Image (cartoon, helix red, strand yellow):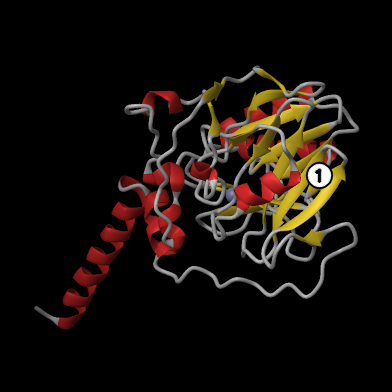
Amino acid sequence: MRRPVVLFLIALWLLTTIVFVWSVANRRTVLIHVMSLADPPALLEVESLEEGVAWWDDYFTLEWLDERTLAIGEPRFAQRNFAYLILGEDRAVLFDTGPGVRTSLRRLVEEVTDLPVVAAPSHLHYDHIGNLAYFDEIALMDVAGVRDQLVDGVLVPTPDQFLGQIEDYTAPRLRPTEWWPPGARIDLGGRTLLVVHTPGHTPESISLWDEASGYFFAGDFLYPGPLFAFLPGSSAADYRMAVDHAATLLPTHVRSYGGHGKLDSTRAPALTRRDLLDLGAVLEGIEDGTAAGGSGLFPRTYPVNGELDLWVDPLD
Ligand SMILES: [Zn+2]
């Protein structure tokens, strides 16, 4: 065969393979495989903490948002995770348990409070359930068929739910002691949390609404930075419905605390109802094709406002 013909056939084969991987195979899973090829990021050095934020050891930070609400930060972890210890009079909730870089989170919590603690993740990604199995009391979201995954009382998140392969984490074996359906009111004694289903980032994502304090604990549904709606299980349509639902629920004065902090701050990441509405407007624009400023092929990135970007799957 003549050389141009051979080159043409090779190019055609490459193109066909790319199109196949992109559309027929699950492009999101392929992306996760590609991400997992890189070495996990090293721990960061943190020079100083802002006022009101203190080290617990040389890894975790503590910031009291009020006398009953503690933000536990991991500023040395590249994703800057935040968990929240929410204290009532009889009981406490630990919302999210970080990636598990350090396994001393339970000891930290027991140093802070004598109350019985139930640990509950916002969703099942590896960076939110790393320390979960160390707690005796575990509440899981009763949504999106999660409960159906139980085998002999044990739940092991699927690779697509967990995504720990990105940083070489192994999925934990979780023994839930309670199930929280959307709309459940979690009574902590003198403090009540409403369970809100907020899918979009993942199907099983939940948030907690503490109406009396005006705090919305949002997990990865809403935090400053890039919001990910392109991962396995993500859905821009679900995201939009969840934002609309949250917007009807939350008042103007809400402070929404997210699961990841900013890279230029060690404080708990707080956002407002305005940020939620701005996100809703972009999601609406993506749905009807009028969203502006999108860049990239996959994931496609849309600016929301000075605090937020939204990363979506354009073929969603
Ligand atoms: Zn996360």
**Residue 114 placed where, x, y %?**
72, 37
Snapshot quadrant of residue 207: top right
- Find disc 1 in the rendering and name its residue: 271
Left or right: 17 in relation to 120: left
- Residue farthest toward the bottom in the current orientation of the protein: 3
Residue in front for this viewpoint, 297 or 55:
55
How many badges with numbers are in the image? 1
Q: Identify which residue is drawn at 77% across, 21% down.
A: 189
- Residue 45 position (above or below residue 71): below
Q: Identify which residue is drawn at 51% across, 57% down.
A: 297
Amino acid type assigned to the residue bearing label 1 in the image? Leu
Left or right: 125 in relation to 243: left
- Residue 125 position (above or below residue 206): below
**Residue 125 placed where, x, y %?**
51, 46
Q: Is residue 83 visible?
A: no
Q: Secondary structure at mark 1?
A: strand
**Residue 233 placed where, x, y %?**
46, 39
Query: Alpha-carbon neighbours of circle 1 within 10 Å: few (<14), some, or many (≥20)?
Result: many
Residue in front for this viewpoint, 36 or 65:
65
Q: Identify which residue is drawn at 90% across, 33% down.
A: 253
The CB of the residue at mark 1 lies under 8 Å from ligand 1: no
- Residue 238 position (above or below residue 73): above
- Residue farthest toward the left in the current orientation of the protein: 1
**Residue 250 placed where, x, y %?**
81, 27
Residue in front for this viewpoint, 111 or 94:
111
Residue in front for this viewpoint, 191 or 117:
117
The image quadrant where one finds the N terminus is bottom left
Snapshot quadrant of residue 51: bottom right
Q: Is residue 126 visible?
A: yes
